[in-house]
Each structure stands twice: as C-alpha cells, then as structure tokens.
Image (spheres, rainbow, N blue to C red):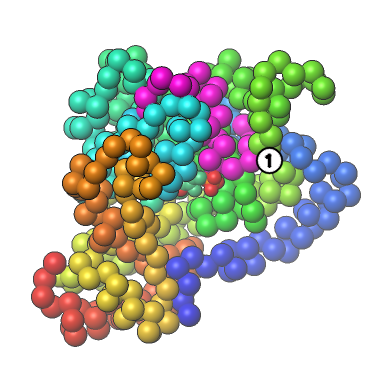
C-alpha cells in the first residue's frame, strides 16, 4: 500500500539522532518546558523574525491562546473560512466568540478576500485566515482590510511551516499565528505539539502565563489560564525536524511539480493552482474530481491510499447548527468539499511510488474518466 503520508520513513530518517536525544532528555530529569523547548522557541522566532515564539500543547490551543491573549471573547465575531479543519472554528467558539464563515476562493481554496469586507460588522474583532494545504492565503488585502477596520489579523499556519508570501514567512504576516506539530503536519512530532508566534510582546507575555495556569511563579496565579505546554521530547524531535524542514519542503515541491506536469492533460482532474507571490509547502496535495468515490476505489484497488480534506464544510456541521447556516449559503466551499481528493505526498514518497499513482490515474482517465469534468 502506498500511504497518503509516509510518517514511518520520515521518522526513520532522524531516528538514530533522535534516540540519543531522547536518552539525554531522560537523563536531564527535565521533561516539560525545558532547555530544548527554549531552544526551539528561539530558533523559530529567529526564522520567522517575530519577537516571540511560544511552545504550547497543540495547534488548537495555540489558536485559543491567541484569541484569549488578544482579549477576544463573548460578544465578539471572528471571520474565518468554513473549509478547514474543525479546530480553527472550534477555538473561536471555545474563546466564547462567534465564528463568521466567509466563502472560499475556488482556485486556492483560501478565504475569498472579495467577500470578507461585507461580513464585517461592529462586533467583528479579528480575521482568521488558514494557509490551507500549505498554501498561504492572500494576506495583503486582508492586512489592508484589518487596518481599515481596526481588526486583528491572525494566521492559522498549522499546515504551512516554511511557506512564504511575497518572500515573507507565514507566521509573521499578521498579529499572531498558530502552528501545529501534529505528526502528519509538514513539521510534525511524535505526538501533539503547537506554537504561537507573535510580535506583540505584551500579549506574548500574557500567553506565556495562560499556557501555564496563569502563573509566573509556582503557586502564584495572576490569571485563570490552562495547561498547554510543550514537552522536551517533542522539542527534541522538532529540533531535529527543523534542521530538515527546508529540504523536506523542497522535496514536496519537486514531487508536486511532477504531479502537475504529469496529470495536466487529464480532463477528469482539476489540479491545484498557486496564487501570485506565494510559495506553498504542500502539506497536502489535493485535486478535485467529479466522481470521488469511484476514483478513490479505483486507486484503493491498486494499493494507493487517498484522503478527503474536508468532506463537510464547517458551516454545515451539526456542532454549528445553532449559527443558522443552511445548504447553499457558501456554495464554493460546499462544492469543493464534495470534490476534493488528496493524493499520496510526503518528502519520502519514492519516484516509483509516485509513478504508480500517476499511471493509475492515467489508467482511470482512459477507462472511465473520459467524460469530462
Ligand atoms: C491541525 C490543524 C489545527 C489543529 O492543530 P492540532 O495540533 O491538531 O490541535 C488547526 N488548524 C488547522 C488548519 C490544522 O490543520
């Protein structure tokens, strides 16, 4: 079976060094928020050119801590995309605010900038775009809208470590950004982990308090916080992965370039396109197809795993029924969620494996997909 994401190979690649690091962590006697977490925070902060990087428990908490850190809560609205992992909207709701979903751009699948402005109300406090599948959202018009309406602009960069927008790294393009180190993310660890990046130093200090029970000194609590910290073992994994990430992202781009060239003439596939000025990291390589289940089964029968991110737009989720959206409200997100299909991609997808995926799709095209899009 060709897996959608080959994590075993990725971790095997750093395993030798990692085992030694893990032994050192064990010896050190310090397992949470220790020197490795500090080193990781320093390295990421320098790379992103932000004043603060704060290691936290996971990407969802990173979003929640950003929202709470900037004082967003009950009565506030946050504009976001319905075509993302649930956590983006969930964090807004957890903070006590209301997610306001705006439809997506049919080409890049990111927030449709032309529709953001009309969704702004007196209660809007922030815009939260997602750099979906590793492709940066169109940040410049969002930065302008945020400035014009005095809103915060946050980035959900959980799928996009290393991506750039007009030469600048994602994570440095708004007031704060969240990263996730969930194993399948392009920069992942062997469990849960996350990070907040921001250049608002005052807020950064508040987030550092909030991640650790609102406490600066043990057993003195200034705020009601939470427990959301990064572990030393995860920091050790991430420090090793960070050394490889540019190479891994480059490998992803090379493989995507091959997919794009080799699949370009297949009429039953709509290939992803990259917006101007953006360099994606291809956390996932998703195409659009009309008869998704047929294509999936065809590939499955040939030993090829595929994935669907995401099958149901967030505005139609049961959990958000109370918001009152109905089918047809956000037609682009709804259409794309029915057609989207992720093909195997990871830095360690071999040439032979990719060739197999490509020929299987070409074979499908000959047999059943000839009837156009
Ligand atoms: C993974 C992900 C999250 C949540 O990150 P966790 O570390 O799993 O909590 C949030 N937003 C997006 C877009 C993600 O892909």
| Foreground of the two, 106 or 311 | 311
Q: Is residue 186 left or right of residue 99?
A: right
Would residue 257 be seen by someone viewing this image from the given angle?
Answer: no
Q: Tell me residue 59's x, y (percent).
A: 54, 41
Residue shown at 79% from the left, 58% from the top = 20
Q: Is residue 121 magenta?
A: no
| Foreground of the two, 113 or 271 | 113
Would residue 156 be seen by someone viewing this image from the given angle?
Answer: yes
Which quadrant would residue 356 be assigned to in this image? bottom left
Q: Is residue 75 magenta?
A: yes
Residue shown at 40% from the left, 21% from the top = 76
Which quadrant would residue 217 be assigned to in this image? top right
Residue shown at 64% from the left, 41% from the top = 57
According to the picture, the residue beneath numbered tag 1 turns out to be 230
Which quadrant would residue 75 be assigned to in this image? top left
Q: Tell me residue 369's x, y (percent).
A: 17, 77
Q: Is residue 350 above or below residue 212?
A: below
Residue extending furthest front? 322
Residue range highlighted in magenta:
54-78
Q: Tell me residue 321's x, y (percent).
A: 35, 42
The crowding category of the residue bearing disc 1, from other C-alpha atoms within 10 Å (few below 14, some 14 to 19, many at least 20), is many
| Foreground of the two, 129 or 123 | 123
| Secondary structure type for disc 1 | loop
Q: Is residue 221 above or below residue 104?
A: above
Q: Is residue 298 above or below residue 100?
A: below
Residue shown at 29% from the left, 37% from the top = 324
Q: Is mark 1 within 8 Å of ligand 1?
A: no
């Amino acid at each position: 079976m060709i897996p959608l994401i080959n994590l075993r190979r990725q971790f095997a690649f750093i395993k030798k060094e990692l085992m030694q690091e893990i032994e050192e962590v064990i010896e050190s006697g310090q397992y949470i928020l220790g020197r490795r977490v500090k080193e990781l925070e320093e390295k990421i902060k320098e790379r992103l050119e932000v004043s603060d990087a704060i290691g936290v428990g996971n990407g969802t908490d990173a979003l929640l801590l950003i929202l709470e850190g900037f004082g967003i809560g009950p009565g506030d609205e946050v504009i976001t995309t319905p075509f993302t992992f649930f956590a983006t909207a969930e964090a807004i709701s957890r903070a006590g605010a209301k997610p306001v979903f705006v439809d997506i751009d049919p080409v890049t699948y990111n927030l449709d900038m032309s529709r953001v402005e009309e969704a702004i109300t007196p209660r809007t406090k922030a815009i939260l775009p997602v750099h979906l599948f590793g492709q940066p959202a169109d940040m410049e018009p969002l930065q302008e809208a945020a400035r014009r309406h005095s809103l915060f602009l946050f980035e959900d960069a959980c799928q996009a470590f290393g991506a750039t927008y007009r030469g600048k790294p994602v994570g440095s393009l708004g007031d704060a950004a969240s990263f996730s180190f969930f194993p399948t993310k392009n920069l992942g660890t062997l469990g849960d982990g996350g990070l907040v990046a921001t250049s608002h130093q005052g807020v950064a200090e508040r987030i550092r308090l909030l991640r650790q029970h609102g406490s600066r000194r043990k057993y003195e609590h200034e705020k009601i916080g939470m427990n959301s910290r990064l572990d030393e073992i995860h920091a050790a994994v991430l420090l090793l992965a960070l050394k490889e990430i540019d190479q891994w992202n480059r490998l992803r781009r090379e493989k995507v370039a091959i997919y794009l060239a080799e699949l370009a003439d297949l009429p039953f596939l709509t290939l992803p396109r990259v917006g101007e000025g953006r360099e994606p990291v291809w956390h996932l390589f998703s195409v659009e197809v009309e008869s998704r289940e047929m294509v999936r089964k065809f590939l499955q029968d040939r030993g090829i795993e595929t994935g669907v991110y995401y099958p149901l737009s967030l505005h139609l989720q049961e959990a958000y029924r109370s918001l009152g959206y109905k089918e047809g409200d956000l037609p682009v997100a709804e259409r794309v969620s029915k057609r989207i299909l992720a093909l195997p991609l990871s830095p360690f997808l071999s040439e032979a494996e990719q060739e197999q995926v490509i020929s299987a799709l070409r074979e499908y095209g000959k047999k059943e997909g000839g009837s156009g899009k």
